[in-house]
Image (cartoon, rainbow, N blue to C red):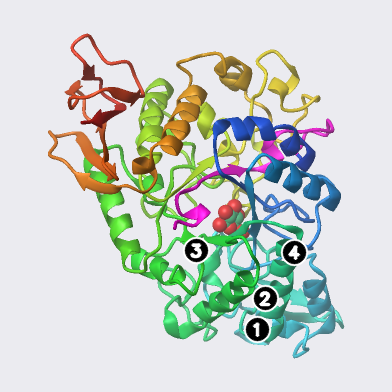
Amino acid sequence: MLRWWEDAVFYQVYPRSFRDSNGDGIGDLKGITKQLDYIAQLGVDALWLSPFYPSPQVDAGYDVSDYCDVDPQFGTLADFDELLSQAHARGLKVTIDIVPNHCSNQHPWFLAAVAAGRGSAERARFHFVDGRGDNGNEPPSNWTSVFGGPSWTRVPEPDGSPGQWYYHLFAAEQPDFNWEHPDVLAEFERIFRFWLDRGVDGFRIDVSDALIKDTSWTDTEGRWPLIPKDDSCGVHQIYRHLRRVMDEYPGDRMAVVETGASDDIVALFIRPDEMHLAFNFRFVKAQWSAKDFRAAIEESLAANVAVGAPTTWVSENHDVTRSVTRYGSNLNLEGAYIPGVSGGADVDVQRGRLRARAIAILLLSLPGAVYIYNGQELGLHNIDDLPDDVIQDPSFFRTQGAVRGRDGCRIPLPWVHDATAAGFSDTETTWLPVSESYRSLAVDQQIPDANSMLTLYRDMVALRKSSPALRHGRLEWTDAAEGLLTYEVSYEGETLAVVVNFGDEPAGLPEGPVLMMSSPLDSSRQLPADAAAIVRKF
Ligand code: BGC
């Protein structure tokens, strides 16, 4: 018997950009509740809500100052409870983002740690270390932060003298917890229970693999941090503990971990006594080629077989350039840790959108769980010409503008072609400007259009729902000409053939009724370039 999350379709809602209900230009929980019918009509099984907790919003809420409340700009706990019960009433599960690696520098524990001074119990919950060199004026190691600049920041001691340094993998406003301290695990157990008691169905665990640092703080050649992830380092004990907590609750609560590690390391986090799913970012980094996508699928499936966990299929989220733009420019994201940096120039958006349609069919035809990022179903492209003065991403500030960051994939969603802020908000002054180029992609334009991206997503999610072969079938590769990706998925007597044309020439399809296609076939039943189709085999 499959558990609900094993082949579920999750829909990521980025609360700031989804729907603003109170006209302050920032999306909020009530806005999400208002649009639950839209989400339910997509046919997805579950939501993942990016952080909505109290936060100074230095990193769009991934700098949490209180893990058990709602930031007033997003609403109240009562609004959350309403969202949860309305979602459940529509058969939608709700999963929320937990940020365990770091908190905000305004979190009460961190404020207390700074105030308490060197050697205090309060400081022991973070990584406060004396500096090197004269008077400790140099940081303890040469490690750089993911957002640029050093990963150490110095604090004044309570007497005002220059003091210790604290470690932050991301921005200075995001101090890392010391997970070797028992208080930290106890606190996160409390946080997990707080939300599980409220009825959430699961969690997405941010930067899940970086909790344990090598505290020898040794300099490295690439200035990257030393973060062990193997079995001996303690990180897996943390997840085993949290798993036991989750298992006390009924209803198959689940967690998906975010990790950028290699396949073999990722597999460790989803062993049966640890977490349930791990994001698989292979599709985010794959180049537009049959070879690349086949390798991504094969290697992802193989890595998970060993631990008996299903894989996940992801092509967008709030950290990466929108796939329409990626596929329209063949942006190479391999090796990019923050792949939010877009080429900008030379993007063929029309072509990117055709290819993104094909990938919608591919994503939703594979065994495992699928994540869709809000706006992906509308075919939104990245907005790469934001003026400097509206940019919010901390990486922009920490690199003096060299990295423009991830704002381009976080632009508010367009709902109504002719409305103020394309229906996202009652004000034109939204947290990031709504792009004029999004108006023609607004929901009200796409719903009645049989050929829209939204219709394709709805149809494809519905086909997946009605065909177990597409959700958890056995996948077999079939012979294909150069540039084609072809496979069959089968389950209990049903076999469906999937063809994705990565090449330049039209391609023939197998015999049988065509159940889904991303572009119209030509008069001789050929699948054009940059398109995908599903055929039922007899
Ligand atoms: C999140 C980012 C965030 C970072 C720090 C990432 O994995 O997805 O949006 O900036 O963690 O919390």
The amino acid type, in three-letter code, at marker 1 is: Val
Residue marked by disc 2: 166
Distance, label 2 to label 3, CA atoms, is: 32 Å
**Residue contact between numbered discs 1 and 4, judged by CB atoms under 8 Å:** no
The amino acid type, in three-letter code, at marker 2 is: Tyr
Distance, label 2 to label 4, CA atoms, is: 34 Å
For the N terminus, the quadrant is bottom left
Distance, label 3 to label 4, CA atoms, is: 19 Å
| x then y, percent, for residue 29 | 76, 42
| Earlier sequence position, callout 3 versus callout 4 | 4
Residue marked by disc 3: 276
Answer with left or right where residue 506 lies relative to residue 345.
left
Q: Residue 129 carries which label?
A: 1
Q: In this view, does 267 lie above or below 324?
A: below
In magenta stretch: residue 22 = yes
Q: Please state the quadrant of the image where ligand 1 appears.
A: bottom right
Is residue 276 visible in the rendered structure shown here?
yes
| x then y, percent, for residue 410 | 61, 38
| Earlier sequence position, callout 2 versus callout 4 | 2
Q: How crowded is mark 1: few (under 14 residues within 10 Å), some or many (20 or more)?
A: many
The one of 426 and 467 positioned closer to us in this rendering: 467
| x then y, percent, for residue 517 | 34, 23
| Earlier sequence position, callout 1 versus callout 2 | 1
| x then y, percent, for residue 412 | 66, 32
Residue marked by disc 4: 197
Magenta range: 1-27
For the C terminus, the quadrant is top left
Q: Which of marks 3 and 4 is in front?
A: 4
The one of 394 and 299 positioned closer to us in this rendering: 299
Q: In terms of secondary structure, where does tag 1 sit? A: strand
